[in-house]
Image (cartoon, rainbow, N blue to C red):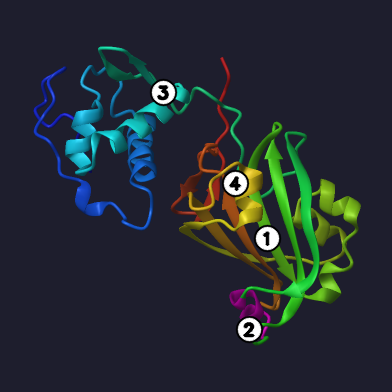
Amino acid sequence: MYMPNESGAAGTPGPATDDGDVLNPDVPMQQQIYRQLRAEILDGLWVGRTDFPGERELAERFKVSVVTARTPLERLGEEGLVARGRGKRPRATYIPPSPGDDDDLPVFYPEEESSAYGYELLQVGVDVAPAEACRLFGLPPGSKLWQCVRLRVYDGLPHVVSHNVQLPEVGERHSLEDLKTKPMMSILSSEGIDVTTIRRRLHAGTAPPIVSRHLGLYLDTPVSVCVLTLLDENDAPVEWIRAYVDPKLPVQEEVRDVHKGYWTIPTREKG
């Protein structure tokens, strides 16, 4: 972990850290430095400090030119994360919220019936599916399956883009109205399809253009990706889902009861 002030003295910059060795030569240096500084600010590493790096210090830290180091600071200033002034040291202005500051956060999964959630149908139809989805249904890569891509919004804000894949005989039963208004689990249940097991795994990745566009991200912005497999009582696959989560929007805390073995969303009493 990078420690911005290794000396520990408030207002006194610590020894310069050489982070130039982790910059990717195939990605603009300004963009990589901007993202690292932004992550540090959002993580609260610069709260209440007076030693936020200026252009020359950034240039030394990342082994780039002063001109290259200037652009990330300008961008952070435009976003209101850093205050800048002529002849003054930059200062991080963002203070991360406490976990309890907002009790009305969205739930990533499972999808819930709630007026706070809305859906926008982005794509639907039968087309070549991802190889992993094809194999789940016992088909060779390159096979065509029913697919839909939907944007889920929470209180009007983009939250998750999901890519749902099903057998054509299942997916083509769904009405467009349902796809635009209901969680997929509710749609499947209303059609008599009983999902009894859900498997999921998380990893980091980059989103395709349709996802980046609707989450307001750059094409190469890292996102959290959740892959879900839904199975029926006979352990037969019902659906394959790849969900992309907007990294800008926090999600509700989940709590696992270790003895009972399941996760729940805690409810807070509002005073």
The image quadrant that residue 89 belongs to is top left
Frontmost of labels 1 and 3 is 3
Q: Amino acid at mark 3?
A: Gly
Q: Which residues are magenta?
A: 131-138
Frontmost of labels 2 and 4 is 2
Distance between mark 2 and mark 4 Cα atoms? 29 Å
- The answer to whether mark 2 and mark 4 are in CB contact below 8 A is no
In primary-sequence order, the first of circles 1 and 2 is 2
Tell me the chief SS of the magenta region: helix
Pointer 3: what residue? 77
The percent position of residue 255, horizontal first and vertical second, equals 49, 44
Q: Secondary structure at mark 4?
A: loop
> Residue at coordinates 83% horizontally, 46% vertically from top-left?
181
The correct choice, above or below, for 184 with respect to 230 in the image is: above
Callout 3: 10 Å neighbours few (<14), some, many (20+)? some
In primary-sequence order, the first of circles 4 and 3 is 3
Q: Secondary structure at mark 1?
A: strand
Callout 4: 10 Å neighbours few (<14), some, many (20+)? some
Pointer 1: what residue? 163
The correct choice, above or below, for 170 with respect to 15 in the image is: below
Q: Is residue 38 left or right of residue 176?
A: left
- Which image quadrant: the C terminus? top right
Pointer 2: what residue? 141
Pointer 4: what residue? 108
- Which image quadrant: the N terminus? top left
Is residue 170 something one can see in this rendering? yes
Q: Amino acid at mark 4?
A: Phe
